[in-house]
C-alpha cells in the first residue's frame, strides 16, 4: 500500500487502510509539534476526525502549516 503526504510517496506494509493520526507519524515525529491543517484527497479533515478517518492505498494527504505575513 502506498500513500502520498505533501507529494512524497510513503510505502506502508499494512494491506488495509490506516487512520490519519497513524499516517501523520510518517510526516512528523510527533504530530502535536506544530499547528497544521490536513486535507485528504482535497477534503479538509478536522482534528477530531483523525482517529476515525481512514487513509487507503493511493490516497493523498496534504499537511498545511500557517504562514505569517502581511
Image (cartoon, helix red, strand yellow):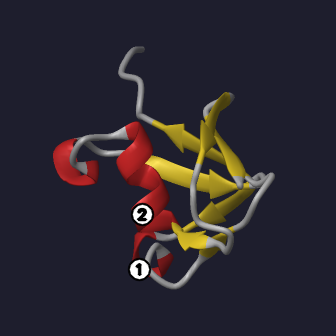
Secondary structure under tag 2 reads: helix
Residue occupying image coordinates x 42% and y 39%? 27
Badge 1: residue crowd in 10 Å (few <14, some 14–19, many ≥20): few
36 or 1, which is in the foreground?
Answer: 1
**Residue 60 spot, x, y in % from top left:** 72, 48
22 or 68, which is in the foreground?
Answer: 22
Q: Name the image quarter holding the N terminus.
A: bottom right
Q: With respect to residue 45, does 12 lie above or below? A: above
Badge 2: residue crowd in 10 Å (few <14, some 14–19, many ≥20): some
Q: Report which quarter residue 11 is drawn in.
A: top right
Q: With respect to residue 21, does 12 lie above or below? A: above
**Residue 49 spot, x, y in % from top left:** 49, 79
Q: Which residue is mark 1?
A: 48
Residue occupying image coordinates x 48% and y 56%? 23
Q: Is residue 21 left or right of residue 53?
A: left
Q: Which residue is mark 2?
A: 22
Q: Is residue 19 left or right of residue 62?
A: left
Amino acid at each position: 500500500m502506498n500513500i502520498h503526504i505533501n507529494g512524497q510517496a510513503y510505502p506502508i506494509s499494512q494491506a488495509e487502510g490506516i487512520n490519519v493520526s497513524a499516517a501523520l507519524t510518517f510526516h512528523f515525529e510527533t504530530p502535536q509539534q506544530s499547528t497544521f491543517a490536513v486535507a485528504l484527497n482535497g477534503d479538509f479533515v478536522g482534528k477530531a476526525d483523525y482517529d476515525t478517518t481512514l487513509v487507503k492505498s493511493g490516497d493523498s494527504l496534504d499537511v498545511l502549516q500557517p504562514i505569517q505575513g502581511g
